[in-house]
Amino acid sequence: MTKDCREMITNLNDFIDGALAPELCEEIKMHISGCKDCKLMVNSLEQTVTLSCDGKDKELPPILEKKLNDLLKAKWDAKFGKTK
Ligand SMILES: [Zn+2]
């Protein structure tokens, strides 16, 4: 796990919270496209990220937000161990 990956996961948390700036959406998309670990981790979420960035006025439905959060944490923990 690199520093960039840590920053990305932080940004993804902001994304889940609906607080992600458009320029960070672009950073996430760029990082994912160039980082195998993160690409694997967020592969199933990539479309959701893209949709959210393109429609940033919309909020995620709560059920999707929870699903995304749980999936992200589970994948991250499985790959890198518990954070914090
Ligand atoms: Zn990465």
Image (cartoon, rainbow, N blue to C red):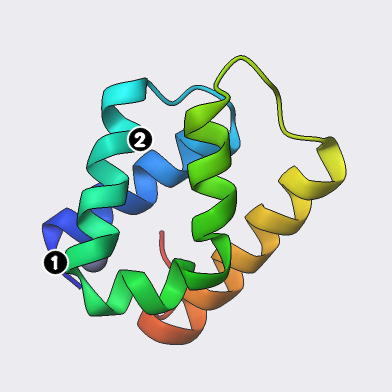
The three-letter code of the residue at mark 1 reads Thr
- Ligand 1 located in image quadrant: bottom left
Rendered image quadrant of residue 47:
bottom right
The location of residue 17, given as percent across then percent down, is 59, 31
The three-letter code of the residue at mark 2 reads Cys
Q: Given the current orientation, which residue lies at the most extreme bottom position?
A: 78
Q: Say which residue appears at 47% left-offset and 32% top-offset.
A: 53
The location of residue 76, given as percent across then percent down, is 46, 72
Q: Is residue 14 above or below residue 64?
A: above
Q: Can residue 52 be spotted in the picture?
A: yes
Q: Nearer the viewer, residue 27 or 8?
A: 27
Q: Nearer the viewer, residue 17 or 26?
A: 26
Q: Is residue 16 above or below residue 80?
A: above
Is the residue marked by circle 2 packed among few (<14), some (14-19), or many (20+) residues within 10 Å?
many
Whether residue 82 sits left or right of residue 62 in the image: it is: left
Q: Nearer the viewer, residue 74 or 44?
A: 44
Would the CB of label 1 be found within 8 Å of ligand 1? Answer: yes
Q: Which mark is residue 52?
A: none
Whether residue 14 sits left or right of residue 23 in the image: it is: right
Is the residue marked by circle 1 packed among few (<14), some (14-19), or many (20+) residues within 10 Å?
few
Q: Dot 2 lies on which element?
A: helix
Position of the C terminus by quadrant: bottom left
Q: Given the current orientation, which residue lies at the most extreme right position?
A: 63
